[in-house]
Image (spheres, rainbow, N blue to C red):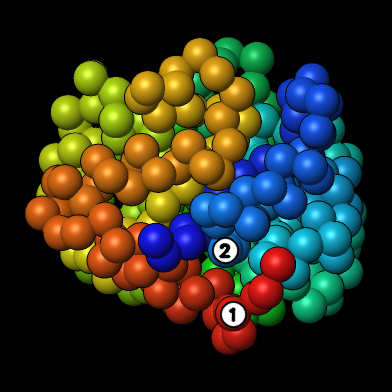
């Protein structure tokens, strides 16, 4: 069976300290059995340093560095955060700026204007450095779409996409955009996500976990990891009416393309 590319994970998350083998032991096993590549996506400048440690430890691990919208008011100034991120992006296995974007779900989140300032600045950084951006959009579809429309030159991954099928169609008309599907695709109430998967071309879709969060059926309630992503892959292959092998191969090819990863890593 073709091994998978998990394009969005958080193996630095504290939750992995709860399991005996820890994140490193788990990843070692997954690379041997089911997974060829993992992209760890940072949520703060501190997380970004942890992402680099995984890049150094595992040949198949790559990184995205950035400030998540929920964390942007903990970073001091935009300028200071950018200074740190620009330095971190010099690491040879940092292949994207992310996880960045907008999150209007919780009232206690940073002010919308603060989120937008960090989002825009990090998109500018991605454009400056020639890196793709990994986007978080929660309950902020209109503003996210509007801001990203200013950056059609920056390749963009819409992580765990939750917008409408029509908005996905519009995204795909605005440059090099990829729609990434997580375990949410397997949920009973994910009617809109399934419709989106039907319309997205095979060469513009990616697989992800967002682990340790969003485990697919039948693993809901458990701590997610890249091995469980096979269930998302099966569902996506069913929707696209292709073989599981072809689905895994094509989504991996797409990920290697958008993240400009040239060589197959041996773990």
Badge 1 density bin: few <14, some 14–19, many ≥20, Cα 10 Å: few
Question: Is 99 placed left or right of 238 in the picture?
Answer: right
Q: Nearer the viewer, residue 112 or 262?
A: 262
Q: Is residue 70 visible?
A: yes
Q: Using a 10 Å C-alpha cutoff, classify the residue at mark 2 as few (fewer than 14 neighbours), some (14 to 19) or many (20 or more).
A: many
> Residue under circle 1?
264
Looking at the rendered structure, which numbered label has been put on residue 36? 2
Question: Is residue 9 found left or right of 136 in the rendered image?
Answer: right
Q: Return the x and y of residue 262 as percentages of the image width and height.
A: 58, 86
The residue depicted at 32 percent of the width and 69 percent of the height is: 250
Q: Is residue 45 visible?
A: no
- The reply to whether callout 1 and callout 2 are in contact (CB within 8 Å) is yes
Q: Return the residue nearer the eye: 64 or 255.
A: 255
Q: Residue at x 59, y 62 (%)?
A: 37
As helix, strand or loop, the secondary structure at mark 2 comes to strand
From the image, which quarter does the N terminus lie in?
bottom left
The residue at the far bottom in this view is 262
Q: Residue at x 40, y 44 (%)?
A: 230
Residue 141: x and y in percent read 36, 38
Label of residue 42 in the image: none
First-in-chain label (1 vs 2): 2
Q: Secondary structure at mark 1?
A: loop
């Amino acid at each position: 069976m073709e091994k998978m590319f998990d394009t969005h994970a958080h193996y630095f998350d504290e939750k992995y300290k709860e399991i005996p083998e820890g994140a490193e032991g788990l990843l070692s096993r997954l690379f041997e059995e089911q997974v060829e590549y993992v992209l760890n996506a940072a949520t703060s400048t501190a997380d970004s340093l942890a992402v680099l440690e995984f890049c150094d430890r595992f040949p198949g691990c790559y990184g995205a560095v950035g400030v998540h919208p929920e964390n942007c008011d903990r970073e001091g100034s935009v300028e200071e955060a950018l200074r740190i991120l620009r330095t971190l992006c010099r690491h040879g296995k940092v292949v994207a700026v992310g996880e960045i974007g907008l999150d209007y779900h919780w009232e206690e989140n940073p002010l919308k204007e603060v989120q937008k300032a960090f989002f825009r600045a990090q998109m500018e950084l991605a454009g400056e450095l020639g890196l793709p951006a990994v986007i978080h959009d929660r309950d902020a579809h209109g503003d996210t779409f509007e801001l990203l429309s200013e950056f059609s030159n920056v390749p963009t991954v819409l992580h765990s996409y939750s917008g409408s099928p029509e908005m996905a169609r519009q995204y795909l008309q605005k440059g090099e955009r990829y729609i990434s599907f997580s375990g949410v695709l397997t949920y009973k109430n994910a009617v809109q996500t399934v419709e989106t998967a039907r319309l997205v071309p095979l060469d513009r879709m990616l697989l992800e976990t967002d682990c340790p969060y969003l485990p697919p059926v039948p693993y809901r309630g458990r701590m997610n990891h890249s091995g469980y992503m096979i269930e998302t892959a099966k569902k996506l292959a069913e929707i696209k009416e292709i073989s599981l092998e072809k689905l895994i191969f094509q989504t991996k090819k797409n990920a290697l393309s958008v993240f400009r990863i040239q060589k197959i890593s041996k773990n």
